[in-house]
Image (cartoon, rainbow, N blue to C red):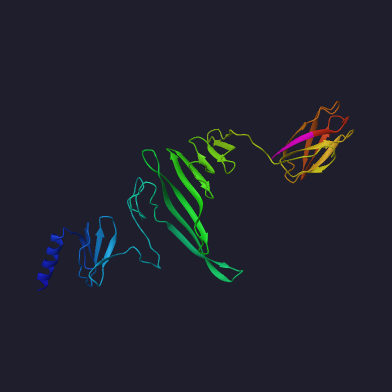
Amino acid sequence: MRLFKVLFFVLVLSISSYSQSSSSAARRIISGTADPSTCQPTGSNIFYRSDLGILKVCTATNTFTALTSSASTSLQTITINGITAGPTDGLILQNTTPAINGTQQVSPALSFIGQGFQTGTSTSQQVKWAIDNVPLQSAGANPTDYLRFSENVNGGGLVEAFTVTRLSAGQYSFGFLGHNNASNPNFYTNGTFLVVNANAVGNGQLYLNFDNVSGIVDVRSPIAFQKTITTAGTTGAQTISKTTGSVNFAAAATSLVVTNTLVSTTSIILCTVGTNDSTMKSVQCVAAAGSFTIFANAAATAETRVNFLVSN
């Protein structure tokens, strides 16, 4: 009788065009392109693996149920050995629904969820980050996509926080707070330079390149430092804790102290006379801890402006 049951089970599988891929005392795995109509569960369990890679298990109702929504509360480890070159899939999150014109199919998200304490309401609140792949329809030969990092707190809607887009071979763009990478990234690489957009509309770009052979940083953009320009009529010692600025010598003055918290005894300070005075033609700047003193070559005939730049 037992032999008859075994032969009958093999016959059913053969007629239905299913092939057994592995077998052991603990489980049986069957593969195919369509679920068997029944599976006759036993203590050994029968698993079915579809051609899309979905694993299903035979239930008490003689049907296969996908193991796609199971939850685990213990450590899960995926080990794939012997990888010597190239990316090899270890875990796949996929959306196989075909895209249509105007409607793209976003990948499932990989989510990281924690719980934080809100002291104002004395409650625990969920905090979440999610990573997914967002396709973009293109008029070219192939669509494009970008990797999206989103976050929310206390169950609110996910907010796009950071994105990564491949522009072309060797060129990538990175964006924060909802910037569209293709047209308005915060910064991107163009193969040679790291390009930083200075504002939300993409104007005023900073180009940076570091030569690891010479150690030279190549900057191909205008640079503006924070500064304070002392207004005309205000003369004498000033407090300006910025990289650059200006002060005014009063008529007959020969020296002036600038208090600046950026300055140390090792600072390099460049000072230039900014007024065409008849006697005061040049200055020297001497650094101290937290300040520097400007010495004129001669007493100023009239109010004279001096500009400075601090380098550390």
Q: Viewed as shown, does residue 132 lie left or right of 303?
A: left
Which residue is at a point 56% across and 71% down the rendered structure image? 123
In the rendered image, residue 204, in percent from the top left (x then y), is placed at 59, 37
In the rendered image, residue 252, in percent from the top left (x then y), is placed at 90, 33
Task: Give whichever of 140, 281 is nearer the camera.
Answer: 140
**Segment colored magenta:** 306-312
Q: Eyeballing the image, is 216 above or below 8? A: above
Q: Eyeballing the image, is 60 above or below 17? A: below
Q: Residue furthest front?
A: 102
Q: Quadrant of the C terminus?
A: top right
Q: Eyeballing the image, is 288 above or below 115? A: above
Which residue is at a point 42% across and 49% down the rendered structure image? 134
Q: Is residue 308 magenta?
A: yes
In the rendered image, residue 79, in percent from the top left (x then y), is placed at 35, 57
Q: Viewed as shown, does residue 256 lie left or right of 186?
A: right
Which residue is at a point 44% across and 49% down the rendered structure image? 147
Q: Is residue 123 magenta?
A: no
Task: Give whichever of 180, 110 is nearer the camera.
Answer: 180
Which residue is at a point 86% across and 33% down the rendered structure image? 303
Q: Residue furthest right?
A: 252
In the rendered image, residue 98, in percent from the top left (x then y), is placed at 33, 50
Q: Viewed as shown, does residue 286 lie left or right of 108?
A: right
Q: Across the whole image, how many numbered discs are drawn on residues?
A: 0
The secondary structure that dominates the magenta segment is: strand
Q: Quadrant of the N terminus?
A: bottom left
